[in-house]
Every structure is written in C-alpha cells, then in structure tokens.
Image: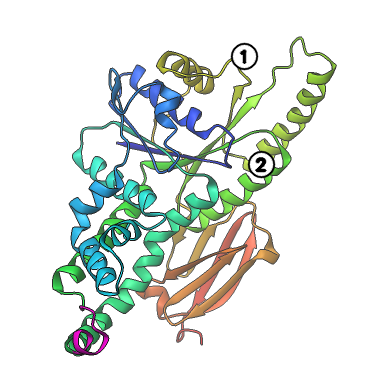
Amino acid sequence: MRVLLFTGKGGVGKTTVAAATATLAARRGLKTLIVSTDTAHSLADALGVEPGEVAPGLHLHQVDTQKSLERHWGELQEYARGLLTELGLDQVTSEEITVLPGAEEVIALLELREHAQEGRWDVIVVDCAPTAETLRLLALPEALDWHVTRLLPVGRKIMKVVSPFMKTVARVSAPGEEVMSAGERFHRGLMEVRELLTGEHASVRLVLTPESVVLAEARRTLTSLNLYGYRVDAVVANRVFPAGGADEWRSQWVAAQSRLLTEAEESFAPLPVHVVPYLPAEPVGVDALAKVGQDLYGDSDPFARPDVEPPLRLSADELSLALPGADRDEVDLGRKGDELIVTAGPYRRILALPAALARRKISGAALRDGVLRVRFVSGGPDD
C-alpha cells in the first residue's frame, strides 16, 4: 500500500494536486482512498461530490471528530466532561470544550491508521493542512511518546496516592484505570501512525507556486520534515504561466516564474519538480482532476515505492540525519544521557539513541552537503 501526503503553504493548490493524484490512481486501476487532515474540508468541493465512493475505485473520507472521539476514546472525553461539570460548567459548555482545537487533525491521522490496517487500499492520499500545522501534527506522535514514556508510569503511582484526597479536598474525581488505559491506547495509536508515515511506502510531496515567499517556506519545510524523519520524494510547482503567446504583462510573470523554477530545481535536487500549468478554468470534478493528474506526472509512476533514503541512518559509530537546505547557524546539537537533541531553526527533535551509541560519547559533529553527521567513540556518554 502506498501512502502519499501533500502539504504546502496555504493557497498554493495542494488540495487540487492531492485530488488530481488520487483521481489518477483510481483511473489506473488502483483502489484509492483520499482523506484530509485540513479542517477546511475542501476536498469534496474540489471533487464536486459528497464523501463516499466518488468514482470507480476512488473513495473520499471526511472525518467526523465527535463520533470518532466517542467511538475510540469515549472514556477520556467522558472523564473530561464530568470533571468540567464538577468544576461548575454546564453540560453544553463542557461538551464543547472537550473537543479541543486541533483534535480533528489528530483524529484524521488516527483514522488514517485504521484505513491502512484494513488492507483494502492500494493508495491512500492525504490532503494535509498548511505546512505549519502539518509540521506540528507530524511532530506530535514522537513528542507525545517522549512525555508518556517518562511520565505515565509516575502518573499512575501518583494517582494511587492522591486519588482518595481529590474527591474530598479538591472536590473533583480522579481518573480511573479505564481513563489511563484509554490514554495509553491513544498514545499507541499515534505511534502506529508515525510508524506508517515514516515507513518505506510513505512519502510527502511539497506543493508550491513559483513565488519567492512560497519557495522560501517550502525549503524550510523540507528541512523540518527531514528532521522529524519523513521522506519527501517530489515537489509540485503549481500555477505556472505558459510561455507561448504571452503579452507584455504575462511575459514578466513568465520570466519571474522561470527564474524561480530554476532556483527550485537547484534547491530541491535531486528531487523531481513536477509542473502544473496555470489552467484557463478551475479544475473541479473527477474528469478535470484526472486530466491535471495525467499532465502532472506524464509517463512516470507516481505510485511506485519512493526512491528516497530515510532521513535518519545509524551505523556502529555514526548517526547521520539529512537536513537539506539547513543553515549551519540554525542547527544546534545537544546531548542529555542517552538522548540526542537536534534543533533546526524553530523545530527541535529529541532522538533516543540506540544502546550501542548511548554507551559512547560524541567525538565530533558536522553539517556538510545537507547532512548532519554525529560521530561516536568508545567511552561514557557525554555530560
């Protein structure tokens, strides 16, 4: 099964590109599911249909956050509602507050895992939220794992001690075993999502328009996605003006876009940069999107296994992490026990070192040709 995620700066047309790719997959005889982690829910508008089987072999799924929460993590939501009621909030307000901002995106990822486990799909296309939200979302499973692994065992012990006093002193109920277990299921589900999306059959495609600001953000996004261990296998340049028959006004756009496309090809090499021309009309509907998909990929196979190495690689004495486009001044490295802390710009990742490297100390680190290499030698871990 192939999993393709599409993201980009808001307004670049990532939903159209994702829908065109999914439509092309179905036209090629692949059982295809397209889902969205974007709360805007514009996929149905792009396809011009309601969720369900929208064409032979093509299914559109739209997340129902409330039902998903109740079905999978009702214990957590029920405890939260009860706690807020005990604190004096009315039932309606408590119900609204328990559906937290960002919950819909997280639920979409967890439902994506369920669809993948069904084994009925050849291709799953994910229309992600704009880049900033997507990066926060994709970083969540590992960040949550770091906290849960360290805090949950301690939290269980503390709850056993303080729960008798919470009802009498604080006048609120302590979470029971079923709530703690639901939290653990939630954590396991997110880790399975991360395993799926960083696996060898999943990749991200960056959608951009040939504009300076958009290109700069796409470069930073590539660096950040690699930092978190996600493969990027292609870039899509959307809304490119055709050069033929251009008047004076459009000729200026053509020249500017041509320069930026060359810059993009250099920035993202060796990744392919697919081009979608500026169309005379908005492509809405399955037929129009299928045409876009065919023009976008031509004779290539966009559903083949990604020919991209995983960003993180380990050997007996070295850890290497691909950070294409990263500036040396923006990359920082730290160590705490058996954890390596890598910072690239505003984003940080805490890597748990395998036992073989955790027993060694760092002998040196360098960022060259877009790859951070950390070397280890025998001896105790660094302070």
Report whether 294 appears left or right of 208: left
Within 10 Å of disc 1 (Cα), the crowding (few <14, some 14-19, many 20+) is: few
- Contact flag, marks 2 and 1 (Cβ < 8 Å): no
- Would you say residue 166 sits in the magenta stretch? yes
Q: Residue at x 50, y 29 (%)?
A: 17
Element class at badge 2:
helix
Q: In front here: 310 or 113?
A: 113
Q: Residue at x 60, y 28 (%)?
A: 238
Which x, y percent locates residue 265? 66, 36
Which x, y percent locates residue 261? 70, 32
Image position of 220 with respect to 75: above or below? above
Which x, y percent locates residue 192? 28, 54
Residue beneath disc 2: 214
Image position of 316 with respect to 106: above or below? below
Q: Quadrant of the N terminus?
A: top left
Q: Nearer the viewer, mark 2 or mark 1?
A: 1
Report whether 348 appears left or right of 57: right
- Would you say residue 290 sits in the magenta stretch? no
Report whether 231 appears left or right of 202: right
Determine the CA span between mark 2 and mark 1: 22 Å
**Mostly what secondary structure, the magenta segment?**
helix
Report whether 51 appears left or right of 307: left
Image position of 169 with respect to 205: above or below? below
Residue beneath disc 1: 280
- What residue type is disc 2 on? Val
Which x, y percent locates residue 266? 69, 39
Element class at badge 1:
loop
- What residue type is disc 1 on? Pro
Q: In front here: 289 or 316?
A: 289
Span colored in magenta: 165-173
